Amino acid sequence: MSTPAAVEAVSIDGEHRFSKVPADEITLLAGIGVRGDAHAGVTVQHRSRVAADPTQPNLRQVHLISVELLDELREDGFDVRPGQLGENITTRGIPLLDLPRGALLRISEDAVVRVTGLRNPCGQINDFRSGLLKRVVGYAPDGTVIRRAGVMGIVLAGGVVSPRDSITVELPTGDHHRLEPV
């Protein structure tokens, strides 16, 4: 029997640090992101992207990672807990990396997040745990880069999100487009 899709943990940080702090709940704000989080905003908030063009839209309002990835990393000797890779929502039971661009994640009763793309992890991940970058970024036999550090999304409908909240995936109609880094 498969595990129903749910929120495993939620995390937030009002400052630009690598890891986020686990919380009892977070509040998603439509068009903004996570209330009180350093990455919330209509326009891009990630430092490198702000430096390139501070007017570009924020396609990275919410960062989601599956607990299954964290479990796999722990089995490989990396002690990684929810929030430590910078995610706001740690999920259970959803193959996040297999979702198409535009998939909707209906969380709790009210919140809706549209998946915009893949997180593109940087070298900071090795500052957190040496060697971890090679576990979340790899190469397919054809040379294609495989990114496993979660997905990014924008908030379409706000609401309070807590651990154990249900998540329903709604796939977009029409052609499905593979996730690319955002």
Image (cartoon, helix red, strand yellow):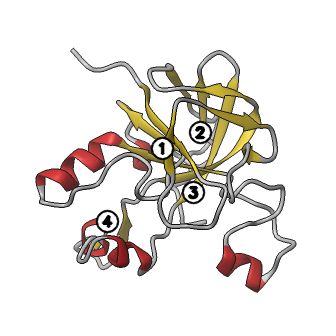
Query: Looking at the image, is 169 positioned above or below residue 117?
Result: above
The earlier-in-sequence mark between 2 and 3 is: 2
Residue designated by label 3: 117
Which of label 4 and label 2 is nearer to you?
4
Residue 52 position in % (x across, y down): 75, 85
What amino acid is labelled 3 in the image?
Gly
Q: Which secondary structure, mark 3?
A: strand
Disc 3 crowd rating (10 Å Cα; few below 14, some 14-19, many 20+) is many
Q: Which mark is residue 99?
A: 1
| The C terminus: image quadrant | bottom right
Q: Which mark is residue 103?
A: 2
Q: Which secondary structure, mark 4?
A: helix
Q: Are marks 2 and 1 in contact (CB under 8 Å)?
A: yes
Disc 4 crowd rating (10 Å Cα; few below 14, some 14-19, many 20+) is some
At 27% from the left and 70% from the top, the residue drawn is: 132
What amino acid is labelled 1 in the image?
Leu
| Closer to us: 112 or 159 | 159
Q: Which mark is residue 136?
A: 4
- Quadrant of residue 113 within the rendered picture: top right
What amino acid is labelled 4 in the image?
Val
What amino acid is labelled 2 in the image?
Ala
Q: Are marks 2 and 3 in contact (CB under 8 Å)?
A: no
Q: Which secondary structure, mark 1?
A: loop
Lateral position of residue 92 relative to residue 71, left or right: right
The earlier-in-sequence mark between 4 and 3 is: 3
Q: Which secondary structure, mark 2?
A: loop
